[in-house]
Amino acid sequence: MALSETHWPVLDAAHGGDPAALAQLLRLCQPDIRRYARRSCLAGDIDDAVQEALLVLSRRLASLRVLAAFSGWMFKVVQRECRRLGRIALNYDPYDEERAEQWLAAQDTAGLRLDLVQTLESLPADYRQAILLRDFAEMSIAEIAAELGLSVPAAKSRLHRARQMAREYLIA
């Protein structure tokens, strides 16, 4: 989250407690947080990690001692949240590379693809469509809602349920 020089006054004002500046800072940081979360989280945890990171930012920004450390601090917040969510879902730590490599080495690529296809095929059509739009077409929740003719909360709920069902199928 490399803020340009024009954003430093916003960061400084938000750090000083200005609610309008904080709201603007959150809007500025969200795309970078999401981009980092996509690289660091399991696909199903990206939205939750972004939301939690923004919440931490809004609550703890005032306690940050050196504003120049903001970017590094924010990356660590996202990374920590991705790890926490990864441990909860499927008892998996996305940063335990050795364990991940051992698991992947024991798996057959064709078998992994087949498991994924079978998982997606096992989902009801409306749930499968939500996952495909989000994780393969990389559409935002708002875009998914518009595409499916749903409200944003309904689209979030459908995606959440679809991911839960997919996890249950894969774990079994």
Image (spheres, rainbow, N blue to C red):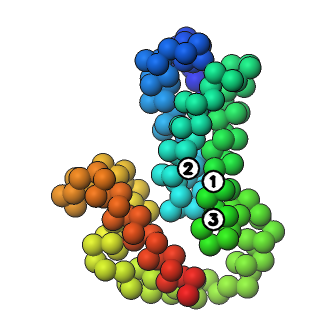
Q: Position of residue 107 (x, y in %)?
A: 68, 85
Q: Amino acid at mark 2?
A: Ala
Answer with mark 3 or mark 1, whichever residue precedes in sequence.
Answer: 1
Secondary element type, mark 3:
helix
In this view of the protein, which residue sits in the foreground, 7 or 59?
Answer: 59
Residue receiving disc 3: 88
Dividing the image into 4 quarters, which one contains the C terminus?
bottom right
Give the total of numbered labels. 3
Residues at marks 1 and 2, CA–CA distance in whole angstroms: 6 Å
Q: Residue at x 71, y 64 (%)?
A: 93
Answer with mark 1 or mark 2, whichever residue precedes in sequence.
Answer: 2
Disc 1 crowd, CA 10 A, few/some/many (<14, 14-19, 20+): many
Residue 148 lies in what quarter of the image? bottom left
Answer with mark 2 or mark 3, whichever residue precedes in sequence.
Answer: 2
- Between circles 2 and 3, the one closer to the viewer is 3
Dividing the image into 4 quarters, which one contains the N terminus?
top right
Q: Residue at x 67, y 71 (%)?
A: 91
Res. 68 in view: no
Decide: is 125 above or below 84. below
Residue 162 lies in what quarter of the image? bottom left
Decide: is 22 above or below 150. above
Q: Which mark is residue 82?
A: 1
Secondary element type, mark 1:
helix
Q: Amino acid at mark 1?
A: Cys
Residue receiving disc 2: 49
